[in-house]
Amino acid sequence: MINIVLFGPPGSGKGTQAEYLIKKFDLIQISTGDLFRYNIKNGTELGKLAKSYMDQGHLVPDEVTINMLTEEVKKHTDAKGLIFDGFPRTAAQSLELENIVKDVLNEEIDLCLSLVVEDEILVQRILERGKTSGRTDDADESIIRNRIKQYYAKTAEVAELFKEQGKYVEVNGVGEINEISEKLFAEVEKVINKGK
Ligand code: AMP
C-alpha cells in the first residue's frame, strides 16, 4: 500500500491533482472537504455543524474531522493506496493521521506532496472556480482570504512534521496541469522504486 498526503493551501490544485494521481496509481482519494460537502448535501447533523464553520472559512473542529476521517479510512482497508486531500490541516490532525494509518491499516504515510502557489494566484483561482463550483466559500473574497489566513495560522506547520521525517516534497503548483502531474508522478514513483 502507498499512502500519500496531498498538501497545500486552498486553491493550490489538490483536488485536481488527486484525480490524476488516483487514476495513475489506482489509489483511493479521501477528501475531508468533499466528505463535509456530502454531509451538507444530505442534511446530516455532521453537515449542519461543518457548514457553520465552512461558511466562515474556518476549520471544522479537530475532533469532528478526525472521527469522520477515521470512519472513512476503515472503509478502505483493502485499497492499493490512499491519497489524503485536505487532511491533515492541523498539527493534532497529523499526529492522529499517523495513529489511524498505523492502527487501522498497519501502514505509514509514505509521502507528503506539497503544491506551492502564491497567495494572489490562489485568490484569483478560487474566485474563478466559484463561478461554477456552487461553493459559497469560493464566492466571497473575504472568506477566501480567511481560508488562506487559516492555512498559514494552523495548517502550514503540518509541513514541518513531514519534513522532519524526510517525507516532504514541494512541487510548483503553477503551470500546465499535466506538467504538474508529471512532477508528482515522478515523486510517487521514487517511493515505489524504493521498494514500496
Ligand atoms: P476544502 O474542500 O479542502 O477546501 O475544504 C473546505 C472546507 O472544509 C475548509 O475551509 C474547512 O472549513 C473544512 N475542512 C476540510 N478539511 C478540513 C480539515 N482537515 N480540518 C478542518 N476543516 C476542514
Image (cartoon, grey):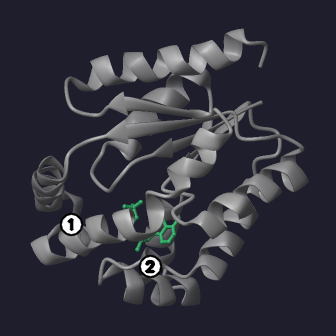
Say above or below: 133 vs 44. Answer: above
- The kind of residue on which mark 1 rests is Asp
* Mark 2 and mark 1 residues within 8 Å of each other at the beta carbon: no
Q: What element carries label 2?
A: helix
Tell me the quadrant of ligand 1.
bottom left
Q: Position of residue 71 (x, y in %)?
A: 74, 66
Is residue 172 left or right of 98 when viewed as pictured? left
Q: Residue at x 21, y 68 (%)?
A: 144
Q: Quadrant of residue 100?
A: bottom right
In 3D space, how far apart are the residues under numbered discs 2 and 1 (Cα atoms)? Answer: 16 Å
Specify whether tag 2 is near ligand 1 (CB below 8 Å): no
Task: Say which element carries label 1.
Answer: helix
Q: Is residue 41 left or right of residue 158?
A: left
71 above or below 156?
Answer: below
- Give the quadrant of residue 183: top left
Q: Nearest the camera: 148 or 133?
A: 148
Residue highlighted by disc 1: 138
Q: Nearer the viewer, residue 140 or 71?
A: 140
Q: In the rendered view of the protein, which quadrant contains the C terminus?
A: top right
Using the rendered image of the protein, determine whether residue 72 is visible from the camera's viewpoint: no
Q: Name the residue under label 2.
A: 40
47 to the left or right of 67: left
Residue located at (69% from left, 16% from top): 192
Residue at horizontal 71%, vertical 57%? 97
| Mark 2: amino acid | Ile
Residue projecting furthest to the front: 164
In the depicted view, which residue is nearer to us: 146 or 38? Answer: 146
